[in-house]
C-alpha cells in the first residue's frame, strides 16, 4: 500500500490525463472518472484506477481534483445526482482546476455551504502549460482559496507544478480564476496570431520552416508560437493537442467578463470572431494551430525557399506583424488585470514563464506596469517602430489581398494612441 | 445636328454606361470608349457613338469624362500611348469621375502641366449613388477644380446630378476626391454591415424579408441597407450591380490614406479585412450584397417565419447591431473628414442624401459636428443605449457562435469611450 493519500480525479482529457498519471507516477493511488471508455482503459494501463461513477470516484477521497472542460460540466459533475460532492468524505479538499469564470468558482464555494457541505475545503486552481507540462508535473497553477484550504491542500498543487510556478493569488476563491482569465488574454491573442503570421507568410511565398526558425530566434517569439508552430509545420491538427473549442471557451469567458464590467478588449474580441469563424468551418474539434487554414489551404511547408534577400525582407514583415500584436496584447492583458484588481507583479511573473509569455511581454510588460503604478521613467518609450513595422506588413498584405485581422487591430490601437506614440498613451486607451 | 457640344467618354461600366447614355438622352453627341466590345454594342444601340481608340474618342471633344475603375486604369487611359490627353483639343475640359486617391487627382493636374498640356481644364469629380441614379442623371457629385475650370465645365456636371446634389468642394483638384473618400468611409462600413446584419438575423432564424421590412422602417435604416437588401433577398449577385472589388478598392484608398496620415479607422479596417476575405473566396466579381454568404450559405429568405414575440425580440437585436455600427461609422467618417480638412457642413449635407446616409448619421451627425466645432449642448448625449443594445446582440451571437466583426468593433469603440459614454468621449478616440 502506498503511504500517500488516495486522490479522486474527474476529467481525463489532454490535460487531466497528464495530471492524473503524473500523480500516479509520484506514488499516489488515483481513482479517475471520465465519460469516454477508451480513456479509462488507457488510464488503467497507466496504473490508475478507473471509475464509471462520479460519486464512487469521490468515496473516501480526502483529495479530489476536478478537471473538466467547462463550468457547465463542472456544475453537473460536482452537484448532479450521484455527483462528486455527494461522494466526498467530511473535510475533503476539492480542487477545481478547469478554466471557468471567477464568478462560477465563487458560486461553487457558496453552493457547497448551501447544500450543507461547508466542511469541504474548496480550492479554485486553474492551470496553464499544455499537455506535456501537465504530464511532467510542471504546470503553472493560479490558486485562490482560504488559508485553511491551502494549509490542508497545497501539497498536492506542489506535486503538479514546478517551484516558482505555483501562484497563490490573494483574494480567496475566484482570485485564481481571475488570474487565469487575464493570463488567457495573452493566450487568446497569441494563439490566433500564430495562424495569422503563418498564413501571411505563406501568402508572401515564405516556407513555414523558415518562418519558425526566424520567429523563434528573435523578438517576435511567443510561447504559443514556439509551441503551436510544431503542429503547424506537421499539420498535426487531427485532433491535435488543443482544440479550437477550448480557446474559444476561454476567450468567451474573457469577453463576457469584459462586457459585464464595460472594459474594452479589442484584440481578444477580434480573436473571438476568428475562433468562431474556425468553428463554423468545422475546425472546432481540431487543433487551434490548424486555424492557419483560414488564410491558406496549402501546407505552409510546401513552398520553395526564396532567394536570401527576398526572404529576409519578407521574414522581417512577419516579425513586424507579431511584434505589434504581442505589444498590444501585453497592454490589453495588463490593463484588464489592473481593472480587475489582479496583482500586477504576480501577473507579470506568471505570464513571463507560462503559455502567455512573449518577448514583447517580457521586455515591455514591466515598463507598462511601472507606468500604470505611477512610477516614472518609461512614459517616453516609443511605439513608432511598432507602428512603422505594422504599416509595412499591412501595406504588403493590402497589396496581396491577405486579411490581417489582428495586425490591423493592433495598428488601430497604436494609431489611437496618437501623436505621442508612447506606451503611456497606448495604456490610456484602456483607462476607461 | 445637335446644338449641344460633343462629349468624349471612357469607361462604360455599370456607372459609366448610365452616365454616358443619360447624356445621350439629354441630346449630347457622346463618343464612348470601352475595352469590352459587347458594351460598345449596347452603347451604340442606346444612341451613342462607339470608339475603339482612346485618342480617337477624345479627338475634337471639348469635354471629356473619364470613368474608369481605378487610378491605374486612369493613368493608362489618360497618359498611355494614343491616350485621351494626346487626343484632346486645346482648352478642353477633362473630368475624372472615378474614385481615386486625392493625391492621384493632384498628380494628374501636375502631369498635364509637365507634358505641356496645361491648357486642359481638369476637374476632379468623383460621384456616388449607384447605377440607377447614374442613368437618371441624379448622382451626387463631389467636385474640386480651379474657378476657371468650373466656369467652363460646370454645366456638364449639372447634367449628371440633381439640384442640391452637386457639391463644389473648396480646395481645388483633390478636394473632390477627398470628399468622396470620406463619404466612402460610411459606404465601406455600411455595405458590409448589411451582410453582417442579414447573416446574424438568418442564424437567429429570422427570415430576410422580415428583416428588411423591420430595418427599412426604423432607426437602423441606411441607404446601403435599403439598396443592397433588394439584391440580398433575390440573391442577385451574379454579377450584381456593384462588385466586391469596387468597394474593396475604395476601402483601400481610405485605409492607405489613414495609414499615411496616421489616423485610426477601426471600422473601415475591419470592413477591409472582410472584403479581402470575400475576394479570397472568389466573390470579388460578384455583388457586394452576396457577402452575406460569409455568414450563412442558405438564402436568407428560406427560413420559416417565427412566432411574433420571438421575431420581435430578435429583430430588435438586429436593429441594435446596425444602430451601434452606424453610430460609430458616423464618428469615424466625420472625424476623418475633420482630420483631412474636409468642410464638415458640406460633408454632412452630402452624406445625408447620398449612398452613405443612415438615420444615425442624420440624427447624430449634426451633434457630432457641433461637438467637434466646439459648439455646446451635445456633449452629454449618451451612448448607453447603443452600448446596451450592442451587448445584447453580441451576447446572443456569442451563445450562437455567430461572428460579428463590425458589431464587436463598434462595441470596442463605445467601451473605449469610457464611463462618460458621451458622443464627445467617442469622438475623442479619433482626436489623435
Image (cartoon, coloured by chain):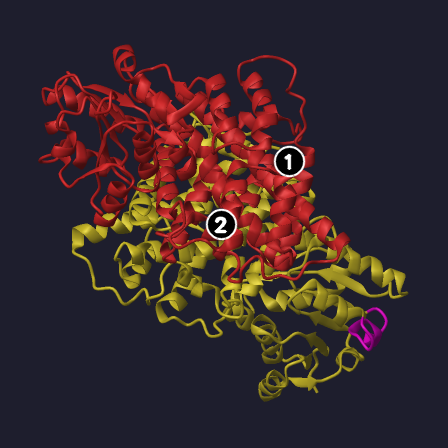
Chain colours: A red, B yellow
Residue, disc 1: A219
Estimate the x, y position of residue B412 in percent, counting from the top left.
45, 37
Alpha-carbon neighbours of circle 2 within 10 Å: few (<14), some, or many (≥20)?
some
Q: Nearer the viewer, residue B418 or A331?
A: A331
Image height of A77 relative to B325, above or below: above
Q: Which residues are magenta?
A: B80-91
Where's residue A230, x and y in %?
A: 52, 47
**Where does the N terminus of chain B fall, quadrant-wise?**
bottom right
| Residue at the spot 36% in from the left edge and 71% down from the top edge | B234
**A179 up-or-down from B340: above or below:** above
In this view, the residue in front, B207 or B210, is B207
Q: Residue A318: which disc?
A: none
- Residue A408 located within the stretch drawn in magenta: no
The x, y position of residue A409, in whole percent, is 54, 42
Q: Which residue is mark 2?
A: A231
Residue B83 colored magenta? Answer: yes
Is disc 1 placed on a helix, strand or loop?
loop
Amino acid at each position: 500500500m502506498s503511504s500517500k493519500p488516495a486522490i479522486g480525479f474527474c476529467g481525463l482529457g489532454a490535460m487531466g490525463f497528464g495530471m492524473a498519471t503524473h500523480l500516479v507516477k509520484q506514488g499516489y493511488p488515483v481513482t479517475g472518472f471520465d465519460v469516454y471508455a477508451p480513456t479509462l482503459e488507457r488510464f488503467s494501463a497507466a496504473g490508475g484506477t478507473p471509475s464509471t461513477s462520479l460519486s464512487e470516484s469521490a468515496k473516501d477521497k480526502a483529495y479530489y481534483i476536478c478537471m473538466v472542460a467547462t463550468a457547465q460540466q463542472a456544475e453537473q459533475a460536482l452537484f448532479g445526482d450521484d455527483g462528486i460532492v455527494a461522494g466526498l468524505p467530511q473535510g475533503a479538499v476539492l480542487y477545481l482546476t478547469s478554466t471557468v469564470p471567477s464568478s462560477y468558482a465563487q458560486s461553487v464555494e457558496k453552493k457547497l455551504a448551501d447544500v450543507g457541505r461547508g466542511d469541504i475545503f474548496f480550492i479554485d486552481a486553474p492551470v496553464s502549460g499544455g499537455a506535456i507540462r501537465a504530464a511532467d508535473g510542471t504546470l503553472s497553477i493560479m490558486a485562490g482559496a482560504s488559508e485553511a484550504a491551502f494549509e490542508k491542500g497545497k501539497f498536492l498543487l506542489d506535486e503538479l507544478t514546478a517551484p516558482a510556478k505555483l501562484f497563490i493569488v490573494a483574494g480567496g476563491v475566484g482570485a485564481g480564476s481571475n488570474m487565469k482569465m487575464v493570463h488567457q488574454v495573452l493566450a487568446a491573442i497569441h494563439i490566433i496570431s500564430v495562424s495569422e503570421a503563418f498564413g501571411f507568410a505563406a501568402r508572401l511565398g515564405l516556407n513555414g520552416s523558415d518562418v519558425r526558425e526566424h520567429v523563434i530566434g528573435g523578438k517576435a517569439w511567443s510561447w504559443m508560437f514556439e509551441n503551436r508552430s510544431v503542429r503547424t509545420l506537421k499539420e498535426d491538427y487531427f485532433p491535435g493537442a488543443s482544440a479550437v473549442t477550448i480557446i474559444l471557451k476561454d476567450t468567451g469567458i474573457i469577453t463576457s467578463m469584459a462586457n459585464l464590467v464595460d472594459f474594452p478588449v479589442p484584440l481578444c474580441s477580434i480573436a473571438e470572431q476568428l475562433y468562431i469563424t474556425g468553428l463554423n468551418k468545422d475546425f472546432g474539434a481540431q487543433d487551434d494551430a490548424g486555424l492557419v487554414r483560414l488564410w491558406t489551404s496549402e501546407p505552409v511547408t510546401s513552398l520553395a525557399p526564396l532567394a536570401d534577400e527576398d526572404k529576409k525582407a519578407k521574414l522581417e514583415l512577419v516579425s513586424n506583424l507579431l511584434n505589434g500584436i504581442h505589444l498590444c496584447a501585453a497592454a490589453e492583458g495588463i490593463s484588464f488585470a489592473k481593472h480587475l484588481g489582479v496583482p500586477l507583479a504576480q501577473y507579470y511573473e506568471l505570464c513571463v514563464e507560462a503559455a502567455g509569455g512573449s518577448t514583447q511581454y517580457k521586455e515591455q510588460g514591466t515598463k507598462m506596469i511601472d507606468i500604470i503604478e505611477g512610477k516614472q521613467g518609461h512614459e517616453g518609450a516609443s511605439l513608432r517602430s511598432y507602428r512603422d513595422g505594422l504599416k509595412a506588413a499591412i501595406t504588403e498584405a493590402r497589396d496581396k489581398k491577405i486579411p490581417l485581422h489582428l495586425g490591423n487591430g493592433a495598428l488601430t490601437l497604436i494609431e489611437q494612441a496618437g501623436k505621442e506614440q508612447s506606451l503611456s498613451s497606448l495604456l490610456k486607451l484602456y483607462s476607461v
